[in-house]
Amino acid sequence: MSQRYENILGAIGHTPVIKINRLGPAGINLYAKAESFNPLSSVKDRLALGVIEAAEKSGVLKPGQTVVEATSGNTGIGLAMVCAAKGYPFVCVMAESFSIERRKIMRFLGARVVLTPAAEKGSGMINKAKELAEEHGWFLTRQFENEANADMHSRTTAVEILESFADIQLDYWVTGFGTGGTLKGVGRVLRKESPNTKIIVCEPDNAQLIASGVQQERNTDGSPAGSHPSFSPHPVQGWTPDFIPQLTEEALGLELANQVLPVNGNDALVAARNLAQQEGIFAGISSGATVAGALKICAEAPEGSNVLCMLPDTGERYLSTPLFDEVEADMNAAEQEISRSTPNHQFS
Ligand code: PMP
């Protein structure tokens, strides 16, 4: 059904669930929920609207007040959209290591982007955002601890998944975690409404923070008091920051994870390319990682199982990253041969 919206915010959510037809083994039904169908092309549009509306409702966010957040990009892009549509100035604090296009998209949407040194990792950018909020009286959205993040997923993402699987049993739901908002918000609803669905939480194989069992050190406000000892840099942007976020820890405390699964970074890149080239689904590195995890589940699952994995964002966000390393700008030998196969319009 075609919809008419009062503004862009109405277009957030209700993303499609799409069958993956060629990547999985025969006899298993693998599906993906494509969050790139959100207006700014990622799952974080949901969080952005959720935290801003909750803050408006509780009165902590005043008309015209500046919003600030530390983000690897997608949250910033979502917040830049929501703030633009609602008329709040927005400042995004971001480590210099994240892709250039993320910064430019945010600035195009009217946000200001403040960079922090790569060496100071995720916790460095969070501390900077906190400092700025305190100094200037700005509203810090605190995506890693804000319950409005998980709430939005309970009210939207989870409900959509239940609707998509109203007529068939969902046996496995596969996700990663960045903040853990998706995991906690969707996980708790599935537990209650679809108790036979097994919840699989993926993390990079070289940054197995959850699997380590080592507790995250925290400040009294729930923010991390430094890097987790099991962290090492990994290629899956948006997944597993250098600490276990409070929302993720709460999800684990609620026993929402049936299994924690390590995923190899290279497997993630391969899966993202396969998704594009064999399914026509254009998604990012964390999507590839989630598919790679889901394929491991498919390999072990009983015949006839229905598996759903999350695709958090679009491949277009990764043009300057290793995802596109093998993609050339110039014609290769095969393309030149096609060009030479007819007489005109050649470069030779
Ligand atoms: N993938 C990407 C690309 C993301 O930006 C994020 C959010 N940081 C996630 C996955 C994880 O989502 P969540 O924060 O809900 O755990």
Image: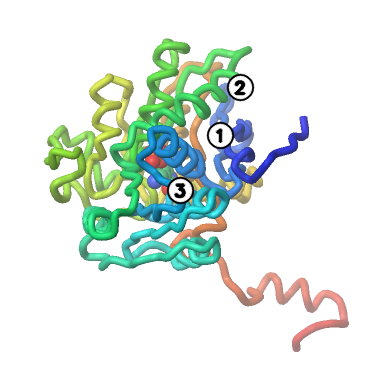
Q: Secondary structure at mark 1?
A: strand
Q: Secondary structure at mark 2?
A: helix
Q: How is the image coloured?
A: rainbow
Name the kind of residue labelled 2 in the image. Ser
Q: Say which mark, if any, is on residue 202.
A: none
Residue 23, placed above or below residue 166: below
Q: Position of residue 29 (x, y in %)?
A: 58, 24
Q: Quadrant of residue 199?
A: top left
Name the kind of residue labelled 1 in the image. Lys
Quadrant occupied by the C terminus: bottom right
Q: Position of residue 114 (x, y in %)?
A: 35, 66
Residue 31, placed above or below residue 290: above
In the rendered image, the residue lying farthest to the bottom is: 348
Instruction: State the residue position of label 1.
Output: 33
Q: What residue do we see at 30% from left, 30% from top?
A: 260
Instruction: State the residue position of label 3.
Output: 63
Which one is earlier in the sequence, the residue at label 3 or at label 2? 3
Q: Secondary structure at mark 3?
A: loop
**Label 1 vs label 3, nearer the camera:** 3
Instruction: State the residue position of label 2.
Output: 164
Q: Are marks 2 and 1 in contact (CB under 8 Å)?
A: yes
